[in-house]
């Protein structure tokens, strides 16, 4: 009997269904090659459902997700829904309820991909950013005092627990060890200003580092990271950081790997169910035109296979993406400029499997 993986499909909003369609196409191609199979179950979540029913994320749906091997998300974001409703009600809630405490972001430059950096190539840009995903400023602690008066006060608190910080840092050390590239781990923080939270991160980092003598440890302030990602991306192997800083530097990293058209991420619960997604958002202005770049969604599928333990299958898709880009048939990473349709890019990559 073929090994089967049960995957929850969250097509979402805008161009989400279009890129997920191509991701599924490539996943099914590799499953046929490697003798396993997927059982995909579709879920209706996103702006259209909210506008139609007023529901954001039903509680019984969260319970269902816990029974899956993984979740595969297209995009969340609708122009007719107030910002924050879907992001907090779906994305953040899923991270917290499913304890997806690691945000994993590979940053890899493929061949023939134009980037804004000069004199840098694929050998210079190959890192992974590990972001704590359930604490920090995104925990939702804070509030208003005397709202809508001249004396209004707004507070937003960064919550960092020793437990949450340690498990993220330990994951990062294990990842650097397993990755075995440069055996280097960089802690990104802001110790010179955010003295309490950064002190907890630094002490936890130093304590855990004693257990990994083979890993070279490094530290950089977040503002310095923003400079060095541009000037010397080759310095970095694995970077670990908190929720807010991770959110910022991963967008910067996406630009140095060719844009959000290739950038994918995973919301990881190493002991539970994880969710994988492209980083480009719903891009509503391109909806239904079949011109959006699906490579990020396909890359999210690569991450999913890797986490599921299908290492060779993940490598085969990664190699297929490389061959598709080396072919020169894909002219750009930008929507409408690829020289191929969304469907044709998916077909091309699948043909190299």
Image (spheres, rainbow, N blue to C red):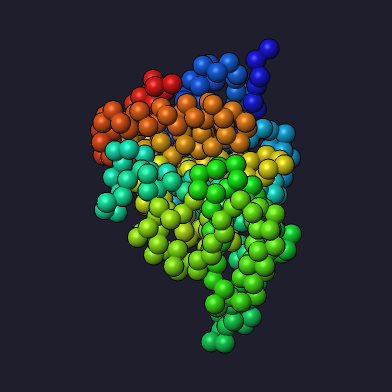
Q: In which quadrant will I find the N terminus?
A: top right
Expressed as whole percent of the image width and height from the top left, the position of residue 13 reads 48, 42
**Image height of 320 relative to 100, above or below:** above
Residue ranking furthest to the top: 1
**Residue for point 37% across, 48% down:** 124
Instruction: Please name whichever residue, 254 or 19, is drawn nearer the observer in this view of the structure.
Output: 254
* Residue 306 visible (yes or no): yes
- Residue 49, quarter of the rendered image: top right
**Residue 197, percent from left and from top:** 64, 71
Instruction: Name the residue rendered at 61%, 70% in the picture.
Output: 198
> How many callouts does the rendering have?
0
Q: Quadrant of the C terminus?
A: top left
Q: Is residue 20 visible?
A: no
| Above or below for 150 versus 132 | below
Left or right side of 299 for 276: right
The quarter of the displayed image where residue 166 is located: bottom right
Please state if 135 lies on the left or on the right of 251 as rendered: right
Say left or right for 159 vs 279.
right
Residue reaching furthest bottom? 151
Q: Residue at x 53, y 65 (%)?
A: 219
Q: Residue at x 63, y 41 (%)?
A: 274
Above or below, 80 against 347 in this view is below
Can you give x and y, in whole percent of width and height, for residue 47 in the image?
Answer: 52, 46
Closest to the observer, 107 or 58: 107
x then y, percent, for residue 11? 52, 36
Q: Quadrant of residue 322?
A: top left
């Amino acid at each position: 009997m073929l090994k089967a993986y049960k995957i929850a499909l969250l097509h979402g909003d805008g161009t989400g269904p279009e890129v997920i369609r191509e991701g599924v196409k490539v996943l099914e191609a590799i499953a046929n090659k490697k003798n396993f199979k997927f059982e995909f179950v579709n879920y209706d979540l996103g702006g259209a459902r909210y506008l139609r029913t007023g529901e954001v994320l039903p509680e019984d749906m969260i319970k269902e997700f816990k029974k899956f091997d993984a979740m595969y998300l297209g995009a969340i974001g609708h122009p007719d829904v107030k910002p924050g409703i879907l992001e907090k009600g779906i994305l953040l809630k899923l991270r917290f309820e499913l304890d997806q405490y690691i945000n994993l972001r590979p940053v890899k430059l493929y061949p023939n991909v134009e980037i804004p950096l000069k004199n840098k190539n694929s050998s210079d840009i190959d890192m992974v950013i590990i972001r704590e995903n359930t604490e920090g400023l995104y925990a939702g602690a804070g509030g208003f005092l005397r709202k809508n008066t001249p004396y209004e006060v707004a507070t937003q608190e960064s919550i960092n627990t020793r437990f949450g910080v340690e498990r993220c840092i330990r994951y990062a050390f294990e990842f650097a060890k397993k990755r075995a590239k440069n055996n280097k781990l960089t802690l990104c923080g802001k110790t010179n200003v955010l003295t309490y939270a950064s002190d907890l991160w630094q002490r936890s980092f130093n304590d855990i580092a004693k257990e990994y003598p083979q890993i070279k440890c490094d530290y950089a302030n977040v503002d310095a990271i923003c400079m060095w990602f541009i000037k010397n991306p080759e310095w970095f192997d694995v970077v670990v950081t908190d929720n807010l800083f991770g959110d910022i530097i991963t967008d910067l990293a996406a630009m140095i790997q060719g844009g959000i058209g290739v950038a994918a991420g995973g919301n990881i619960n190493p002991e539970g169910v994880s969710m994988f997604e492209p980083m480009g958002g719903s891009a509503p202005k391109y909806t239904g035109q079949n011109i959006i770049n699906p490579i990020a969604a396909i890359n999210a599928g690569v991450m999913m296979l890797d986490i599921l333990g299908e290492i060779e299958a993940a490598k085969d898709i990664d190699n297929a993406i490389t061959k598709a880009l080396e072919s020169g048939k894909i002219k750009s990473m930008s929507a409408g400029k690829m020289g191929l349709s969304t469907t044709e890019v998916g077909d091309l990559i699948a043909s190299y499997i």
